[in-house]
Image (cartoon, rainbow, N blue to C red):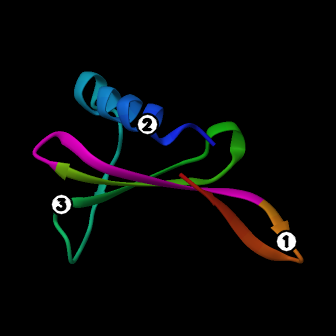
């Protein structure tokens, strides 16, 4: 899992400089967005809170090895 501080900076940079990050706006909270990708084939969900185009909060969920057959995620 990427260091969350580095991830926030990287996500902010990608959002501002390249604009290629596809975000889906939250239904109940218009300042909350989700981005799904699969780096190295591993599903990852990134949730960000935005104020205009500034990321004010970020959390990531990345799938990891199951435990006793149960789906598990690393949180950052």
Does residue 62 belong to the magenta stretch? Answer: yes
Numbered badge on residue 67: 1
Residue 59 in the image: above or below residue 71: above
| Badge 1 element | strand
The disc, 2 or 1, on the residue closer to the chain's N-terminal end is: 2
Circle 2 crowding by C-alpha within 10 Å: few under 14, some 14–19, many from 20: few
Q: Is residue 69 magenta?
A: no
Say left or right for 55 vs 43. left
Q: Is residue 45 left or right of residue 29?
A: right
At horizontal 61% and vertical 46% (from top left) the residue drawn is 38
Choose mark 2 or mark 1, whichever is in front. 2
How far apart in space, not on screen, are marks 3 and 1 (Cα)? 34 Å
Give residue 30's position: percent from left, percent from top.
16, 65
Q: Which residue is mark 2?
A: 5
Residues in magenta, as a range = 51-64
Most extreme residue toward the right, as rendered?
68
**Total marks in image:** 3
Q: Left or right: 10 with respect to 65?
A: left
Looking at marks 3 and 2 on the same chain, the residue that comes earlier in the sequence is marked by 2
Q: How many neighbours does mark 3 have within 10 angstroms: few (below 14), some (14-19), or many (20 or more)?
A: some
Which residue appears at 19% of the width and 71% of the height?
29
Q: At numbered mark 3, what does the secondary structure look like: helix, strand or loop?
A: loop
Q: List the residue tagged with mark 3.
A: 31
Q: CA distance from mark 3 to mark 2?
A: 20 Å
């Amino acid at each position: 899992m990427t260091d969350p501080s580095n991830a926030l900076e990287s996500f902010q940079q990608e959002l501002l400089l390249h604009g290629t990050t596809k975000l889906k706006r939250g239904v109940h909270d218009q300042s909350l967005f989700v981005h799904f990708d699969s780096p190295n084939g591993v599903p990852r969900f990134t949730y960000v809170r935005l104020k205009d185009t500034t990321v004010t909060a970020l959390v990531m969920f990345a799938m990891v090895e199951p435990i006793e057959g149960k789906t598990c995620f690393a949180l950052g």
